[in-house]
Each structure stands twice: as structure tokens, then as C-alpha cells.
Image (cartoon, helix red, strand yellow):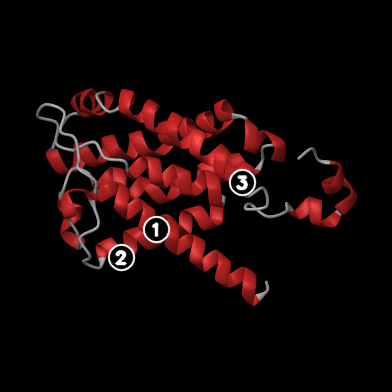
Amino acid sequence: MSPRRTSTDLALISGFAALIAVCALLPAIKVGANPVPITLQTFGVLLAGAVLGARRGSLAVLLYLVVGFAGLPIFSEAKGGLGVFAFPSIGYLLAFAPAAFVCGFIVERLPRHKIATSVPLIFLAGLGSSALLIHPLGIAGLVWRLDLTWPAALAVDVTYWPGDLAKNLAMAFVATAVHRAFPDLLGRRPRDAAHPDRAARTPA
């Protein structure tokens, strides 16, 4: 990998880690007595995967988490440090990096012209990542930290679903717009590198 590509990757990873921090620190919304406030974190997390791909997207989230666990108050409600493991939101936090990876993994396997034009496909990639990882691990965190039953934790988590749908839809619109503006952002697939004539025939 060239030094220029490496520096670009580092800049993108750092930039998206900062974006996730900003999304977390924007005013949170409390829904009734629910213990975990609604933030834009999941928007930033899944956008990182959809825009940067599995590897760089998950690294951006990991950078955000490591900096937060190290003590910088960049989690929701300006929390930071290892003390966040005592909060009911810990399951959601721990789900973020694998969710970004899965979202990026799915997007990377879509046809290149679909990535830039199909909001529904990007939306489904984010929604699948949320359903497979963020919500199950979030529910597990609620059970662990609040000593809830699994049905009670599920009932809490269900209240976040409408917001999640809206955030995933917004993420899909932003991701497709970014890919239209920067069509080479994901890089070339390994099989395209081996068959440049195939890549040349791929619709833009």
C-alpha cells in the first residue's frame, strides 16, 4: 500500500471517528423513563461502514471507542472512561464496531453503480446490521446492567426502533450521495484488480 493511500485511510478513519463523537455529543432525547437516550451515534457508526467499507469503517468505530474508554468524554451525555461499562448503554457501544463491519461488508459486495444510486439497498445493509448486532447486544447490556428480564429488556429496546429506522434511512441517503461524489472511495475489489477489463465494463 502506498504512503499516500495509507495517509488517506488514516485521515478518513480519524474523520469518521470524530463524526461519531459529534453525533454522540449532540443533545440526546430521553423517551419516558428509558435508561438509554436516543442519539445519532448509530447514524455515524453505520455511515462509517457504508462509506468506508468493512475494514476502515470498523477501525473508525474502534478508534472512537478506544479514545472514549481511555477517558475522553465523547460518549452520549459526555461520558467517558471505563466507568461506562457500568451503564446500561454498554451493550449498544460494544455492538458498534461489528455493526459497522457488517454494514460495510454488505455494501462492498453490492454492484458499484448500485452503491451510488440505491438508497433501499444501503438502507437494508444498515438495518440488517442493526437487527443482527446493535439491538441484540443492546438488549443483553440492559439485562446485564439493569438486571432486567429478557422480555423487559426487549420492551425497552423496541422503543428505539422507530428512531433507528429514521436514522438508517438518513444514513442511506447520505452514503449514496457520498459515493456519487467520490465513486472510488471504497477502492477496487480484489477480483477487479485481477481482471481490469471487468472493472472497466462495470457501469459507473
What residue is disc 3 on?
181
What residue is disc 1 on?
17
Where, quadrant-wise, is the N terminus in this rendering? bottom right
**Tags 2 and 3 touching, CB below 8 Å:** no
Tell whether 126 sits left or right of 151. Answer: right
Give the quarter of the image for residue 46: top left
Tell whether 28 sits left or right of 164. Answer: left
Give residue 146's position: percent from left, percent from top: 13, 39
| Amino acid of disc 2 | Val
**Tags 2 and 1 touching, CB below 8 Å:** yes
Q: Residues within 10 Å of mark 3 (few under 14, many from 20)?
A: few
| Amino acid of disc 1 | Ala
What residue is disc 2 on?
67
Camera-near label (2 vs 3) is 3
Camera-near label (2 vs 1) is 1
| Amino acid of disc 3 | Ala
| Residue at the spot 86% in from the left edge and 53% down from the top edge | 196
Tell whether 105 sits left or right of 129. Answer: right
Q: Between disc 2 and disc 1, whose residue precedes?
A: 1
Depicted 10 relative to depicted 110: above or below: below
Q: Between disc 2 and disc 3, whose residue precedes?
A: 2
Q: Assign a secondary structure to mark 1.
A: helix
Give residue 77's position: percent from left, percent from top: 16, 49
Q: Between disc 1 and disc 3, whose residue precedes?
A: 1
